Image (cartoon, grey):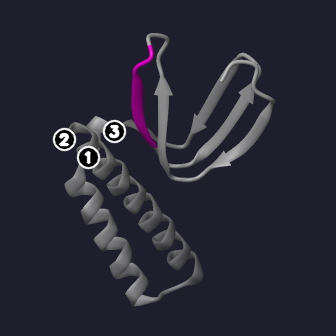
Amino acid sequence: APRHAPLLTVLKAGEVRVQTPDGDELPFYVGGGALEIQPQRVTVLADTAIRARDLDEAAALAAKQRAEEMLKDRTTEIEIAEAQAELVRAAAQLKVIDRLRKLRK
């Protein structure tokens, strides 16, 4: 919103909606990053950004399944952390896909 108080925060994987000057909302999936709000500008620095309409549901489901299998194998702490992060990203993508599907109805 215009004249918002300055803010800097970390973004987790999920949806970011961009409002265009004509009032349309464009949904994006971001895989994490940072958000900076200044009085006249908002900046998103994302690790990954994909237009919601371009998300691949089959790929997200496959990534979720791979991450769940890695967690079952319980290898090193680093591999477990990587699998958990991948699971969070895949779940966030599926949530964005589901929301977009509901909006289209």
- Give the residue at x 46% y 72%: 83
Q: CA distance from mark 2 to mark 1?
A: 5 Å
Q: Secondary structure at mark 1?
A: helix
Which residue occupies the foreground of this view, 104 or 33? 104
Query: Residue lying farthest front?
Result: 105
Mark 1 closeness class: few <14, some 14–19, many ≥20 residues within 10 Å: few
Q: Where does label 2 land, which residue?
A: 105
**Image quadrant where residue 7 sits:** top right
Front label number (3 vs 2): 2
Q: Where does label 3 land, which residue?
A: 52
**Image quadrant where residue 9 sits:** top right
Q: Name the amino acid, label 1.
A: Lys
Q: Position of residue 88 (x, y in %)?
A: 46, 64
Q: Name the amino acid, label 2.
A: Lys
Q: Are marks 2 and 1 in contact (CB under 8 Å)?
A: yes
Q: Where does label 1 land, which residue?
A: 102
Q: Decide: is 44 above or below 3.
A: below
- Give the residue at x 46% y 89%: 74
Dominant secondary structure, magenta: strand
- Give the residue at x 26% y 63%: 61
Mark 3 closeness class: few <14, some 14–19, many ≥20 residues within 10 Å: many
Q: Which residues are magenta?
A: 23-29
Going from N to C along the chain, the mark reached first, 3 or 1, is 3
Q: Is residue 76 magenta?
A: no
